[in-house]
Image (spheres, helix red, strand yellow):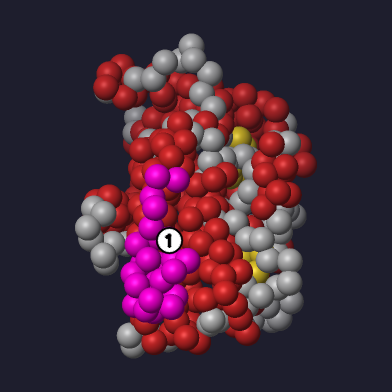
Amino acid sequence: IELASAPYIEMLLQWLKCGSVDDPFNEFVVMSDSSIDMVEKLRKSGYVMDGDEWNSMFTINEENVVQHLISSFGSSSSEELSQLVLQTGKYWNAVRQCQSSLVKEIREEEEDDDSSPRSQLNSGSMALAQFIRRANQRSSASLIQLMVQDFKLMDTLNTFKRYFLLYQGDFFVHFLDAAEDELLQELSDVSRGRVQNWLSLSVQLTDADQDETWPGLKRDKDVHHDASMGGPLSPDGIRCEFALQSVVDHLDEIHAAGGGIGTSNARTPSRQGYEATKGLIGVEAFMLDFPVVPFPTSLVFSKRVMKSYQLIFRHLFFAKHVERRLVGIWLDHQLLREFGSLRAALGPTYCLRQRMLHFLQNLVYFMMFEVIQPNWLKMETTISAFVAEACEQENKQSKTLDDILDVHNECHQVS
């Protein structure tokens, strides 16, 4: 039995310690949809793997799950065992693809680890179970440490909050002061080059103001920052994009994909107003984007997650734009105070404007401070606790990267 199981144990060891699969006869519990060599070639050629692509690279081959090992995990099912093995190798695979000084240290630590499951299958399945659990804990802790310390996950989250969730108020003011007239045109007439130029300038002004206000956050502007080599995503990488459909149509498509009424079906009376519009204007279609999110940051900010942030941004941006326009109308109305004869005639107009402004201000406050802010603070607290647990090697129940991804996804979905 020991000789017959040797090839399988070798594949298991290679997967649990390196995150690579060498299975020419399709005998291992993990199937690779793309060879590791091809992934490394794509990475060297400048290709950046998305988090969704990474998640689908490896899958479980149920036929090759060794039933002899299931009992070693107590009451755990074969699905839980398979997921634990799959998760461990995927984490090591992600660590191998990172370009960071910390990766070398992690690899050296793993090479110095003499623990091996080669002889543990026959000596007792419990020993092998303990080896798999330790390997899972080390791989998870190494990847989380890499993302938090080298790639500054929390700083990147703060960047998304400042710009995609519009918590950097001066950025919104700087940008619309320059680009509002351009964005009020039909989408086909908007100059993307000018909008991008104003966007970049607004980001630079915002960062400069923040550096003066918070000297401890100041970064060296003269040093070129490459997030793929470590560090947070820089706001300088933000680019403008324009959607081809309204937020309502986009939400209808998502709802239809989940089994709801599609956009081609009859709409409610409140939706009929969208039929009469000629098309989108720039301010309705404008959104932010990070065209390239380096690995492993892309595990958290995948294309699917980026779309969620963009939907939230478009909704907030348009609401704050309407609020800004109503404030402008209020300023215009102040100029009419000298004309007493008009005040009585324009009374209903003043009342309507004030009610609209009151509603918009309360709506924006509710979205940002009653919905987004509490969920964001809860997410930050939970992720910080997960990171602390993962760094404690003696903690056998420490959280994994998947737990962090679940918390992050729940936050922006609830928001």
Q: Identity of the amino acid at label 1?
A: Ser
The quarter of the picture where the N terminus appears is: bottom right
In the image, is 99 to the left or to the right of 197? Answer: left
In the image, is 382 to the left or to the right of 63? Answer: left
The location of residue 7, given as percent across then percent down, is 61, 69
The location of residue 139, given as percent across then percent down, is 42, 55
The quarter of the picture where the C terminus appears is: bottom left
Secondary structure mostly taken by the magenta-highlighted segment of the chain: helix
In the rendered image, is residue 114 in sight?
Answer: yes
What residue sits 44% from the left and 75% below the top?
Answer: 121
Q: Is residue 334 above or below residue 131?
A: above
What residue sits 63% from the left and 40% below the top?
Answer: 291
The secondary element bearing badge 1 is classed as loop
Mark 1: give few (<14), some (14-19) or many (20+) Cα within 10 Å. Answer: some
Question: Between residues 392 and 26, which one lies in front from this camera angle?
Answer: 26
The location of residue 300, given as percent across then percent down, is 48, 52
Q: Quadrant of residue 254?
A: bottom right
Q: Is residue 211 above or below residue 388?
A: above
What residue sits 71% from the left and 53% below the top?
Answer: 244
What residue sits 23% from the left and 53% below the top?
Answer: 392
Most distant residue in the top direction: 222
Number of marks in the image?
A: 1
Q: Which residues are magenta?
A: 111-135
Q: Is residue 101 magenta?
A: no
Q: Provide the residue designation for mark 1.
A: 116
In the image, is 201 to the left or to the right of 143? Answer: right
In the rendered image, is residue 375 in sight?
Answer: no
Q: Is residue 129 magenta?
A: yes
The location of residue 234, given as percent across then percent down, is 48, 31
Q: Is residue 98 above or below residue 255?
A: above
